[in-house]
Image (cartoon, grey):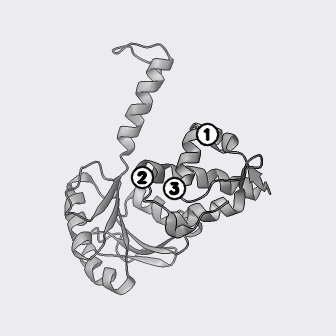
Amino acid sequence: MTADPTLRREIPDATVARLPEYLRTLTTLAEKSVAFVSSEELAASVGVRSAQLRKDLSHLGSYGVRGVGYEVETLALEITRALGLTQNWPVAIVGMGNLGHALASYSGFVTKGFRIVALFDDDPSHVGERIGDVSIRPSADIAACARELGITIGVIATPAPAAQSVCDALVASGVRAILNFAPSVLSVPPGIDVRRVDLSTELQILAFHAQRKLGLTSGTVVPR
C-alpha cells in the first residue's frame, strides 16, 4: 500500500543511506520474477531488523500489505523515485589515473541513473584520450563544460594534494554534489553535498575485523 506522496515526511540521512541496499535486493528479486517479499526477508537480505526496514519504508509512504508483504516492482519504483534515479544525472570525473579510468569505464552507471558526460585531467598524455564516447579534457575546461553540459555531480579521483583545488573549481562552476575518492577532507561552502570514499580507510577497518576474527593481537605478524 502506498500513501499519498504529498504526506511523506523528510527522509532521515540514515534511511537514505539504506535505500540503495533495499533497491539492490529488490532489483535482484525482480530479475528472478519474484512478485512479493516480506519485510523479514527484505530486512534479512540487507542486514537490518524488520522493524527498522518498516520504519525506513514508512518515510516513503510504503507500508506493504499484512500477510502478503511488499510488491517488489512497486517498492523498487518507489525507492527509485525517492533517490531521484528516474532521470539521468550528468556526471563529471576529474582525475584520469587508474581509478578514474575504471570509474569512467563502469557500465553500471548508465543503468543506475547516471551519465558520464565529461572527463578531466591535467596530464597532457591523457588529454584527448577517449573512454567510451567521452574525450578527456584539461581541468581548465571544467567551468565551460559544467555550463555547457549541465553537470550536477562531480567525482574527484585525483591524488590528495590536487583534490581541494579541483573541488573549488567544481563548486565555482555550479556543481553542488561531489563524490570524493581522494584521501583528503574537502572544505566546501554551505549547500554543497560531499560524500567521501576512502578505500585505504575501508581496508584498514577490514584489517581490524580480520585481526579480531583470527584471534591476533596488535604486533602479531600475519604469515605470508
* SS class, disc 2: loop
In this rendered view, identify the residue nearer to me: 120 or 75.
75
- Quarter location, residue 74: bottom right
Side of 217 relative to 186 (left or right):
right
**Residue 88: x percent and y percent?**
51, 75
Instruction: Kindly identify which residue carries mark 1.
Output: 50
Image quadrant occupied by the N terminus: bottom right
Q: Name the amino acid, label 3.
A: His
Asked if one can make out residue 113 in the rendered structure from this viewpoint, the answer is no
Between marks 3 and 2, how big is the CA–CA gap?
Answer: 8 Å
**Residue 112: x percent and y percent?**
56, 65
Between marks 2 and 1, how big is the CA–CA gap?
Answer: 17 Å
- Quarter location, residue 73: bottom right
Q: Closer to the N terminus: mark 1 or mark 3? A: 1
Q: Name the amino acid, label 2.
A: Pro
Q: What residue sits 21% from the left and 74% below the top?
A: 172
Instruction: Kindly identify which residue carries mark 3.
Output: 59
Side of 208 relative to 140 (left or right):
right
Q: What residue sits 78% from the left and 56% below the top?
A: 35
Instruction: Kindly identify which residue carries mark 2.
Output: 12
Tags 2 and 1 in contact by the CB under 8 Å rule?
no
Q: Name the amino acid, label 1.
A: Ser
* SS class, disc 3: loop
> How many numbered marks have been drawn onto this rendered protein structure?
3
